Amino acid sequence: MTVTATTTADLRSESVRSLYDQVMARCKDADHLNGIGGILHWDQEVMMPPKAAAVRSEQMSVLVGVLHEIQTSPIQGALLDELEYRKQHEDLSVVLNPYELANIRLARKQYKEETLVPVDVAKAMAALNSKSTAAWAEARKESDFSKFAPFLEEQVKVVRQAIGYKIRGGANEEARKINEKARASLGLSETDECYKGYYQGLMNIYETGFKEDRLQVLFADLKKHLIPLIAKIKAKDFQHDNSFLCRDYDISKQVEFSHSLAKEIGFDTEAGRLDVSTHPFSGGAHPTDVRMTTRYTLSTIKNGITGTVHETGHSVYEQGRNKEYLGTPVSFSLSLGIHESQSLLWERMVGLDKPFWTYALPLLKEKFPEDTHLQAVTVDQFYLALNRVEPGFIRIESDEVTYPMHVILRYEIEKALIEGDITVSEVPTVWNAKMKEYLGLDVHEDRLGCLQDIHWSFGMIGYFPTYSLGSIYSVQIFTHAREQIPGLAEHLAKGEFEVLLRWLNKNVHQQGSLRESGDDLVFDLTGKHLDSSLYVKYLTDKYTAIYDL
Amino acid sequence: MTVTATTTADLRSESVRSLYDQVMARCKDADHLNGIGGILHWDQEVMMPPKAAAVRSEQMSVLVGVLHEIQTSPIQGALLDELEYRKQHEDLSVVLNPYELANIRLARKQYKEETLVPVDVAKAMAALNSKSTAAWAEARKESDFSKFAPFLEEQVKVVRQAIGYKIRGGANEEARKINEKARASLGLSETDECYKGYYQGLMNIYETGFKEDRLQVLFADLKKHLIPLIAKIKAKDFQHDNSFLCRDYDISKQVEFSHSLAKEIGFDTEAGRLDVSTHPFSGGAHPTDVRMTTRYTLSTIKNGITGTVHETGHSVYEQGRNKEYLGTPVSFSLSLGIHESQSLLWERMVGLDKPFWTYALPLLKEKFPEDTHLQAVTVDQFYLALNRVEPGFIRIESDEVTYPMHVILRYEIEKALIEGDITVSEVPTVWNAKMKEYLGLDVHEDRLGCLQDIHWSFGMIGYFPTYSLGSIYSVQIFTHAREQIPGLAEHLAKGEFEVLLRWLNKNVHQQGSLRESGDDLVFDLTGKHLDSSLYVKYLTDKYTAIYDL
């Protein structure tokens, strides 16, 4: 380990630079252990022999324990306290640049969050997760919510417990204010149960600094415009031909095509791998070791392509992170929403649009020369086929118009659940009513409804909104890129992706966690706060044209 | 982590069982971290993208640091001391079984060894290794020993330093006695430099409990018989036809054939993987997660097959370890020599013999039906081709008759080097003289001579003898197996490998580190101490027949 051994006694005599370096050394050690965890996770999904599952989970638990010890070591706390003391007595910006100042802020935040939850609660959560996920998998298979309900009940309990420690400990001021206000208005004492504000706290685990009341405004706007748009498309009762997408496509050729697309977009294959797994993801250990996966379907070429382009968006973010501050907190993505904005920007704003296919369709035809049906397809036909809107039960199979409704439905349910407005047993009924209202669908099986996602079984409550925040970010960022990069569409149509990638490297990836929220990042970049109207306009214009509404 | 937190103060009031469990909990945590290291190593050789090399070495260094902290934690020392105190005051065997007693002995030994070398010396060794290996690779490429010499000099220095700490600290009584005796006879004081006995200490890192004077007797016997045997074969000036082995064999079919052989022998593919790497190895994390690799050559089918069977021997050892004590010291292989005995037993005693090919040759012919030359080959012809003896410069390419001479040469040089009888600059001359004496070959390039192996560049001095100890063990163990298993040859000729595998599981693999040396294991199993005459007889009989001597 690179950590400098030192005692807390003599910190007052050390320079700010030295204190900073010692804090960062421990952050870098933690980053390396996290990186190891990333490789183990990848290995588990892609390479690991099945009988190793039990020992792998033990290895991960030892690793998490070691990581926790490093992240909560008293010396790290003492160093951070000393830096806080200095901050109050001198101007740190004389010695440290904005990235370094952000690093102190972030390291302090992480330390607080890691130390506020008692170890036994953290362990109980980890133990519950494995049982709960197994129960969820079983329940989904049998489409029997009652088998999962007791575990979800337990998850709600421990998730509330853990976030409660953080909120009370001062790790989330916004959440604490909401909670105090609610207590006051309800006339509750400090010991009475009250979970208002807990959702704010949970959401900030995944989307730092984002206020839930802003989220509500954005989501209300989406509902207002997208529910009628979906209804209009449905009423049209018309579909574009996509038969040429849905025929048997040789898997090994699909793999070759996807690899070449990833490389063309800018994925550095000497600093990462693309493999196959059941659940596609982008992970790994470091900008020089990014591991992404995708999944290929014999009967359609669409999944492999869109999946690869999506994960490539995540991966080029990772490969493009700020080289100067690697391993320190400021170098990491600000939030899941911002990370998702990069995968969605490449998948949808680029990969579902005509310029991209002007370039890529000839290459696809070259790869499948024997497919006479495909050979005859035009870019326009390909575009229409790729962008079919079909309201369905399953979130991960849904198109970009209906997707937000899947997310909003989950947000509304998980918020009500965690803050005590509905009970676990009410989840299926509420789910099904909202599916009817938002997408006009009748859910007859919970496996196609409230049992479809793994998130809640992992205690991941507050995560879902980041998917749609990612969409809104992506439209606003791409719109701005188009204004800033002359002839962007022409570049894309020629397969010149580098100009866009470099712009994103500079304006998003290398910005890391310099700012306090995704909204700040977007504001500094585009001059406007995050704005759902751009997203609504993009969807409305695009699908009005596609479906001639 | 599963480690029970406790203070040293109240250990006297704890039961022996509780003390034992706490020591083992820490051993198991260490085993998991080692297992993680095993996966990272495998990943590095088989999967890792090239640009990740730097970050991987940092990750490994953090992991090694964490492991060192666990293995040298004061609480572990206190627990072991308390167990030592109890041992002197009560009969531990009332509470603990022989495996558990061995675990205490081994944990104590490991703790001592880990704590005796100061952390800064251990770090200096790790840092030197990476520089030294790079220098060796460069020197080998250019066949220029002078580029490696300063690093070898440095390695000799730090290796002496580290083993010196261990010997003086009482971690190797045999080595200490040799050193003291030498000092006395030379009239040296305790502060004078004297490295006698250091080789004993180094060899025991890899081959626990084995005395060097026994090694000398065995190696003298091998030299006495094998040098003339090799000369006789050479004088014959005759070779068996092996042209059917050395033609282009489609790699993907070779892979399929090797996978099926490994599986037939008993490698559980649900608890391990077989992949490809430049340097074949068997590693991984656990009996449920064994990772082995092999290497295929287009122009000959021999390497892929013998390499796979060799690594399978290592891997079925790992998969066959004692399930009841997994993660504790007694479950691990006693020594590298014993481990190698299992790979060599399968590679040579089984895989180079006629019964095996009676079974496997028809399968090989099935795999390459279009190869008319191969179709006409008989088992006898195949056997003769596989077992050609050809004295050559390169150890890893050598046959079983000349192999021991490569090892003995290295042993003699590295012993003289570490104990101060020759200097680094003399290595090439001594090497070349011995090659001439043992194998009748003139070395004209150091890359084909003293620069061919990576071991010394890693500070691995004392490792080489385990290769030949492995050969001697393997013959003695296999000879005994043949006496104990009725009709073994017939079983092998029918591809019924399980009877041998189960016998080895019980008599070797599951014995783990219960005994104090490989010699003890062999003695308990066969009723005889390790005996080179069996090995000499095996080679003499086999090759007298093959070459009609």
Image (cartoon, coloured by chain):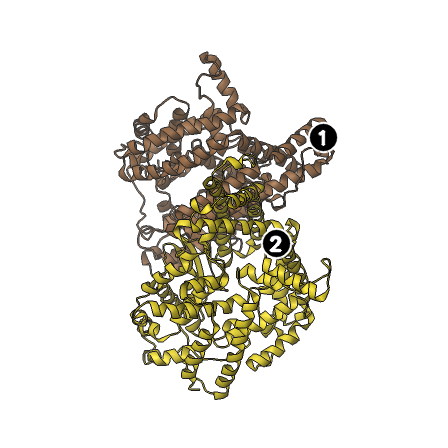
Chain colours: A brown, B yellow
Residue B541, position in %: x, y?
A: 42, 80
Q: Is residue A514 visible?
A: yes
In the image, A211 versus B427, the foreground residue is: B427
Q: Which residue is mark 1?
A: A91
Circles 1 and 2 on the same chain: no
| Amino acid bearing label 1 | Asp
B194 lies left or right of B363? right
Extreme top residue here? A187
Q: Which residue is mark 2?
A: B170
Q: Nearer the viewer, mark 1 or mark 2?
A: 2
**10 Å crowding of disc 2: few (<14), some (14-19), many (20+):** some
Image: A9 above or below B519: above
Give the residue drawn at x 63%, y 66%: B138
Location of the C terminus of chain A by quadrant is: top left
Q: Secondary structure at mark 2?
A: loop
A29 lies left or right of A377? right
Chain bearing tag 2 is B
The quarter holding residue B416 reads bottom right
Q: Secondary structure at mark 1?
A: loop
Give the residue drawn at x 55%, y 76%: B393
Name the mark on residue B72.
Answer: none
Residue B283, position in %: x, y?
A: 47, 57
Instruction: Tell me whether circle 1 and circle 2 mark residues in contact (CB < 8 Å).
Output: no
Image: B301 above or below A97: below
B513 lies left or right of A371? right
Q: Give the Cα distance between marks 1 and 2.
A: 55 Å
| Amino acid bearing label 2 | Gly
Residue A105, position in %: x, y?
A: 61, 32
